[in-house]
Image (tube, rainbow, N blue to C red):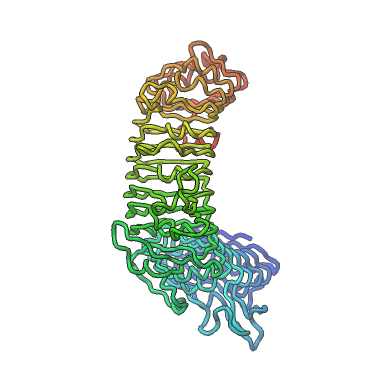
Amino acid sequence: MRLWVQEYVRNDVECQVLEGLFPPPNLKVLKIRNNRGARFPSWMEEHRCSISSSLVELRLFSCCKWECLPTLGQFPSLKELTITEAHSVKKIGPEFYGEIDNMHGRGIINNKGYSYFPRLEVLNLEELSLWEEWEMPAAGEIHSSGGGGGRHVLFPSLKKLYINSCPKLLTLSPVLRHLTNLKEFTVRECPKLASFSAMLRRLTALERLEIRGCDELVLDGGAAEDDAEDDQETISSVQQPVVVDSQVEEEHMINDVERETVAAQLPSWMMKRHRLLPSTLVRLELDGCCLNWEYLPTLGQFPSLRYLEIKKADHVRKIGSEFYGGEADVVGGRVYFPRLEYLILEEMSVWEEWDVPAAGEMDGVGGGTGGGRHRHGLFPSLRRLYIYSCPKLTSLSPVLRHLTKLEKILICGCDELASLEEEGDGCGWVLPSLRTLCIKECPKLASLTPILSRSTNLNRIEIKECAELAWSEEGNDERGWMLPSGLEKLSIDDNSPKLPSLSQMLPHLTALRVLRICGFRNLQCLPLSMHNLHSLVSLSIEDCPAIECLSDGGFRLPSLRKLWIKGCPLLEGRYQEGGPDALNIPTTAKVLILPPLPEGWWFYNI
């Protein structure tokens, strides 16, 4: 059942309509949108709600004048609850849960005692612009786990909690301490939300944590010498970095170890043992809560972490040993980020250096056991590496040499990145699994030779706005710039005068299936060597204002299925239906004259 109301209907009439829509007792899904009444209808009150036993999903959209939420905690079948744009709600309090009356038998009881929201699995609270507090049921009703009989349980089945755009919300600690079965926790755009990190370690089932746009958030962890601090939470506006390192798996907690100070004195709390995040984490996204960090959190010993995204760490100059954690001498060696598959580092404006763990811990590639020392592995499972908007980063060589499972690398907006291989680095490292290489907006990058010559499985390349890029080691060594013969997809923007011409670049790419040519300002005709591309299925020509025809010697691409043309005014009219050269296109090919497309659209959609 859905209810929505036209804007011209009076509020009192709207309230009467909603009040009169007494739902049937077997209703499973209820959605109310744009209700302008001062409160929810009386039939939603707990003691007279006919749908309380059957309702599975409830969505309340833009009930902007409701000052309190309906009592929903005793709905036994409710699994999904979404509340959006409740702009008059300032507090979620005991009325949200309902009363448990032992004397009259009201309340939901199971083997753990009475439960609030006993089957709720997904809770989404979004755009509650005045919401400040989230209180628990009446004092004395909620007890910590492990107590005696008769205790009451809050959200025992909750798996996913999403909180978005609640600008006045101050803390979540009272609720988080009870969500022991939570698997996904997302909080976005809550700029006044302060510390709740002492509660995170209670979320022992947590697999995904995403924090974005929470400028005041402190992830400090609290001292872990005792559990006494579990019930105390300090709200502070001073940001500090997370420090985590795994020591005690059976406790599902992450413990910090001491490390050397680099460039600045570490705060004293970083030199103590901490327990912050549960080791069950599979996905971690931090955006906007790391603005003042000088160091990245120590995450290298998370045993289950597979996806890591860190954005806007604007004070981090170096990623060093503190990022990996662990001790140098470990029997049998140590593996850093053992299961991490996706790593995204974005908008780190002063980041200059990316180092490996402490000297002597990492073996050279293919170099035996390092003189009797134990071997240590770095990112052994990493498949995707994305680096965006890190303008001061100069090199990736120390880390790249270890990424033997890397399948895709995307580097964009790294103004100072000059090379993927440092001077004296040698030729001992390879990327045997690399299949996709995307380099954009790296104006000082001069060579891709290390990757092109050592990545034997590379089949997709995109190059854009790399003005110094040249694929030649000696300047006139044609073999230096040759693309891999097995390449299947190529996108190239001709904004580098040092790149070889199309006639040099394309002839040997007989496996090429998708080709995008963009920004060749002086190109008048495609080279005859294009005829060698017998496997070409899709050809895109963009922003080439001087091109007049596809080929002087006839257009012989028998496998072509799509020809995309954009920003080529002299070419568009010739190959449209009825144009003078339309009959020269293979009958199996479709010609598309395109409007502007989103950045990177062709690369991921063709």
The total number of labels drawn is 0
Q: Position of residue 238 (x, y in %)?
A: 33, 66
Q: Position of residue 171 (x, y in %)?
A: 43, 70
Q: Position of residue 422 (x, y in %)?
A: 36, 39
Q: Is residue 286 above or below residue 384?
A: below
Q: Nearer the viewer, residue 18 or 287?
A: 287
**For the view shown, which residue lies furthest in the bottom direction?**
103
**Residue 602 can be seen in this image:** no
**For the view shown, which residue lies furthest in the right direction?**
26
**For the view shown, which residue lies furthest in the front direction?**
372
Task: Please give the name of the residue rendered at 53% of the width and 59% of the height, measured from the top-left corner.
Answer: 303
Q: Is residue 66 above or below residue 311?
A: below
**For the view shown, which residue lies furthest in the top direction?**
553
Q: Nearer the viewer, residue 392 or 194?
A: 392
Q: Nearer the viewer, residue 134 or 276?
A: 276
Q: Please indicate whether residue 297 sits to the left or right of residue 369 in the image.
A: left
Task: Please give the name of the residue rendered at 56% of the width and 27% of the height, measured from the top-left corner.
Answer: 513
Q: Is residue 316 above or below residue 219?
A: above
Q: On the rendered image, what quadrant is the C terminus found in?
A: top right
**Residue 176 can be seen in this image:** yes
Q: Position of residue 453 (x, y in %)?
A: 47, 31
Q: Please tell me in which quadrant of the rendered image residue 558 appears.
A: top right
Q: Please indicate whether residue 186 sits to the left or right of residue 414 in the image.
A: right
Q: On the rendered image, what quadrant is the N terminus found in?
A: bottom right
